Amino acid sequence: MTLKRLALLLSMVLILVLVASYWLIRMLVIIPMLEREVATLQWHETLTVRQYFSQQQMLLTELAASPGYDRWARGVLTGGESEPQLTKGAEIALLYGPDLSLKSFVTHTPRETDQFPILVEDIAYARARLMPAMLPESEMSTTGLLWMDEGLYSYSASTVCSMDKLGCSLGYLLLLKPLRVSEMEASFAKLGLKVSARPAGLEDQALSELMILEGFEQPAEQRELLVKDSLAKGAWVLTLTYSAQVKHGVEQREWIAFVLLVLLLPTTNFLLWRIFVTPIEFGSAQLRQMERERQYRKLTVNMYVREFQHLVNAFNGLIGRVEKQRKQLQDLSQTDSLTGLANRRGMDHFAIREWRRLCRAKYGAAVMMLDIDDFKAYNDEFGHQAGDDCLVCVAREIKRVARRGEDIACRYGGEEFCIIYVEVLPETVEKLAENLRGHIERLHKSTALLKRPISASIGVALIEPGADLTKQFQEFDQLVRIADQQLYLAKQHGKNQVKMWRLSPAATDKPT
């Protein structure tokens, strides 16, 4: 599997994990929490409906305690004033004696007493359940609901006291007020609640009761609640459509979140490729190319991850150390261990490189061959250690005249040395050769390593600037052979001297 495919797979797995995590959190945490909150709100909405009925009963209780009803009830029961002073409303007033016998029946609108059988019949015990306990020393009252004549009424029953409130056993005052469905629904609509009512049937007796408020652990879109009167008779079935609901479906904003998660996939891939994949692939390609070429070098890739950059830096540091060691080995392979000058291999490498430049640029050059005169006799006379010391001293003098970076001085073999100058003027070469010969001749005066004076013969092959080498030469070794021939001539003419051959741009000078 490639790194790109792995990054794509990881990003897809990441997106799937995010979606699955959100879905699990939604189903296991968010939805249950919302259901609890919605169930609480629905309970409060139902409580508001129940409070509506309690409020209607409280209004009747306050009305029964008003002066008009109080004087009328006391006057009728004591045989005095019998004309009622009713307030405006749809209430019905009934007055009973202490034995619950009906004394008076008053309504704002014409009504027949047979519409209220339980309240007007002679069987008093049937309505005793609606009346409060009669205590002579205090006024008592009860409230509730009463289902009669296919209608639901709110009622308030209270004991009637004397003028001085010393006795409250004169009788009972019962106020009724019909509850109309249209008025109730309009009242709840003002509060933002949708409530509808219908008469209860036998099949509705098993419904939850409004006044108990049970079973609100889970929310519901609608609930049917049974309203019972004070005689435990089913009256109304209220259908409550709650405004607070839990939406189990995926909402629009959740779809937007899912779309953003899908769009996150290419964004994640781009970041993964930018930060991880592209740098690693680029570095891997460089390593494969190095392996094919069998030539290792430093990586030229920048990693955005710190740990990866540390690996790149470590690899580059290792390659740097290897290159340094290789260069040291190369220098050792091209350096003479005794004198510290370049050996034949180092000179050949330098000559090949400079030969191309010399043929192309025609900047002029010089090859100087130097041989210590009678070195074999010196070595035989004083020993090999003295001979090595002699070579080291001569090499030190040669380094002084070959200090530029473009020049090279090497030990050509035994007691023979070679110096190659590039981009040098003819008069400078003559001075350098003569100065070097003179310094070697006077060398025994400046060092105690030499047992006796020595001398050196020098042969020079000089190429003046502008000369075209390609017309007469094919390789650099030909110049070295010419310089060696000049050295041989210097040996034949008495040693300790300089012989020079030169090639000018116009013609070839003969050896002098």
Image (tube, rainbow, N blue to C red):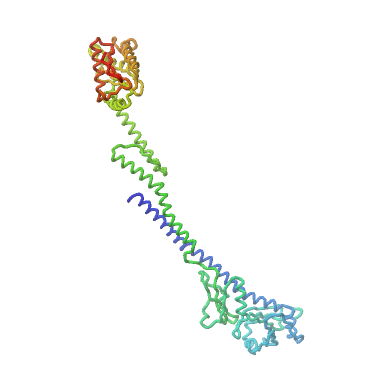
Q: Quadrant of residue 192?
A: bottom right
Quarter occupied by the C terminus: top left
Query: Residue 494 placed where, x, y %?
Result: 25, 9
In this view, the residue in front, 176 or 297, is 297
- 367 relative position to 163: left or right: left
Q: Is residue 331 visible?
A: no
Query: Residue 229 placed where, x, y %?
Result: 59, 80
Q: Quadrant of residue 162?
A: bottom right
Query: Residue 371 placed where, x, y %?
Result: 26, 15
Total labels: the figure holds 0
- Residue at (57, 70) in percent of width and height: 45
- 57 relative position to 448: left or right: right
Residue 244 versus residue 197 in the image, above or below? above
Residue 270 versus residue 296 in the image, above or below? below
Q: Is residue 222 visible?
A: yes
Residue 438 versus residue 86 in the image, above or below? above
Residue 337 versus residue 373 in the image, above or below? below
- 78 relative position to 346: left or right: right
In this view, the residue in front, 393 or 205, is 393
- 166 relative position to 342: left or right: right
Query: Residue 478 placed where, x, y %?
Result: 24, 22
Q: Quadrant of residue 19?
A: bottom left
In this view, the residue in front, 497 or 324, is 497
